[in-house]
Image (tube, helix red, strand yellow):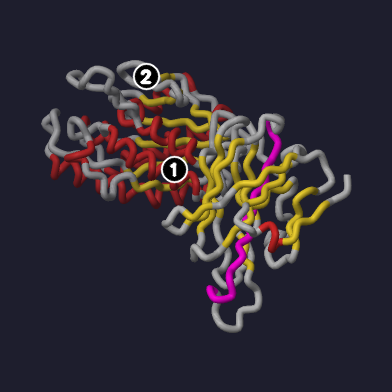
């Protein structure tokens, strides 16, 4: 088949042109990160009596799973691990999340230390989310230094430190949440003062442990600041949905921005290239839903600085390997690369809030799981929309790769 080119002026006549090919998906990670949520009842969670039928508190783990899913991760790339399942009051009714964990209601650092050797194998996890120390404060007179020291012992046990075995577990340790007026008679002011004292010990503890074993970084996650315990806990101590969602968001941001990276590239979606600036600069591409499923609607959204610009969307069989831009400023748009392709045309509309949107359904013939769609968008800018002296009236988005599931 001979390659065919469509002039950009023709292609930009109100249409968004995509071409689809079916090569094997390249540069996708098959690595699955195993996350161990570890702690006390704040990790385990549970639903108190008296709530309306069907209402459950699901734990921060549920909302963290949803946050991960919204960014393209699924059970092929993320696995919550642990010997426990659900919450203290049973499994969560929404089974669309990984309910494994290692949370124990009432446990202090000492209880975890006594229990870890029974169940723990450092090879079962790559990441640990550790929120622990509340019960030490509630039920003992230990100093902040003593509690921090026992937290350090927990970290050592989690690493399973052995001179002959490399340790690669990343440990995310929380500065624990405060309490509010509660059902247990804990004095709010003095208890929160002790929580604050413990939390000041966490950053130096993390720095020391990281320096000791650099391949097993200990990352501090501030779960305390701006946590409204008086309104986002159901008993002054344990989060309800709002508090769990707040905790999940902080865990997720810490995971997402960790350096070195602890999360693999989502298999469903990743960006490439940086776009090419013209009179409105380069433009980011977004998409929803993620990932692309055969026969389901897929939306491409591209930020547009002016409704005067007209867009051509491109779906290629290869990403922009140069890391910049493959199409912008070209006088032609590649439509058919001489391979076994499927071509469709979609109208781009402006939604009135500065986005160019193309909705389409993946064709039924494009049904090879793992095949990639590499999206880019080129915008043509009318001369009157560009600054005086501008000679290039094209700009492009970064690229976006979606994987057919």
Q: Percent position (x, y) of residue 98? A: 47, 25
Which residue bears the numbered disc 1? Answer: 252
Whether residue 75 is in magenta: the answer is no
Q: Which of 134 and 2 is in front in this view?
A: 2
Please rate how many residues cluster around mark 2, counting C-alpha atoms within 10 Å: few if below 14, some from 14 to 19, many from 20: few
Q: In which quarter of the image is the N terminus?
A: top right
- Relative to the observer, which residue lies in front, 54 or 79? 54
Above or below, 258 against 161 in this view is below
- In this picture, is 211 found above or below 164? below
| Helix, strand or loop under label 1 | helix
> How far apart, in angstroms, are the residues tagged by discs 1 and 2?
23 Å
Residue 239 image-quadrant placement? top left
Q: Position of residue 107 (x, y in %)?
A: 31, 26
Q: Give the range drawn in magenta.
A: 369-385
Which image quadrant: the C terminus? Answer: top right
Nearer to the camera, 58 or 158:
58
The reply to whether residue 160 is in sight is: no
Q: Which of marks 1 and 2 is nearer the N terminus?
A: 2
Occupied quadrant, residue 57: top left
Q: Which residue is nearer to you in this view: 187 or 394?
A: 394
Instruction: Give residue 93's mark.
Output: 2
Q: Is residue 89 at all visible to an observer of this figure?
A: yes
Q: Residue furthest bottom?
A: 389
Residue 393: which disc? none
337 sits to left or right of 202: right
């Amino acid at each position: 088949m001979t390659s065919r080119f469509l002039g950009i002026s023709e292609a930009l006549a109100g249409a968004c042109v995509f071409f689809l090919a079916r090569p094997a998906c390249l540069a996708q990670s098959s690595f699955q990160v195993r996350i161990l949520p570890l702690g006390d009842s704040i990790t385990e969670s549970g639903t108190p009596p008296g709530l309306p039928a069907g209402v459950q508190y699901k734990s921060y783990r549920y909302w963290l799973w949803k946050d991960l899913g919204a960014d393209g991760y699924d059970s092929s790339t993320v696995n919550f691990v642990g010997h426990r399942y659900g919450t203290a009051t049973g499994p969560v009714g929404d089974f669309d999340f990984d309910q494994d964990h290692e949370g124990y209601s009432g446990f202090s650092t000492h209880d975890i230390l006594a229990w870890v050797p029974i169940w723990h194998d450092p090879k079962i996890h790559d990441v640990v989310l550790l929120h622990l120390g509340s019960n030490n404060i509630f039920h003992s007179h230990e100093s902040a230094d003593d509690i921090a020291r026992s937290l350090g012992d927990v970290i050592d046990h989690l690493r399973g430190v052995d001179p002959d075995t490399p340790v690669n577990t990343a440990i995310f340790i929380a500065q624990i949440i405060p309490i509010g007026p509660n059902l247990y008679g804990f004095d709010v002011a003095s208890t929160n003062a002790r929580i604050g004292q413990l939390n000041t010990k966490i950053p130096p503890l993390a720095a020391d442990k990281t320096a000791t074993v650099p391949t097993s970084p200990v990352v501090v996650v501030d779960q305390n600041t701006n946590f409204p315990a008086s309104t986002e806990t159901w008993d002054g101590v344990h989060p309800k949905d709002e508090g769990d969602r707040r905790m999940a968001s902080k865990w997720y941001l810490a995971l997402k921005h960790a350096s070195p990276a602890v999360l693999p590239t989502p298999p469903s979606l990743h960006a490439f290239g940086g776009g090419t600036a013209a009179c409105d600069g380069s433009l980011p591409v977004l998409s929803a839903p993620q990932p692309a499923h055969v026969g389901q609607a897929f939306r491409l959204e591209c930020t547009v600085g002016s409704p005067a610009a007209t867009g051509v969307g491109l779906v290629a069989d290869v990403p922009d390997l140069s890391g910049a831009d493959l199409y912008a400023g070209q006088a032609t748009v590649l439509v058919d690369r001489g391979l076994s392709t499927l071509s469709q045309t979609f109208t781009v509309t402006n939604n009135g809030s500065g986005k160019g949107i193309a909705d389409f359904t993946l064709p039924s013939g494009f049904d090879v799981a793992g095949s990639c769609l590499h999206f880019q968008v080129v915008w043509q800018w009318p001369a009157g929309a560009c600054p005086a002296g501008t000679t290039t009236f094209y700009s492009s988005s970064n690229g976006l790769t979606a994987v057919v599931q």
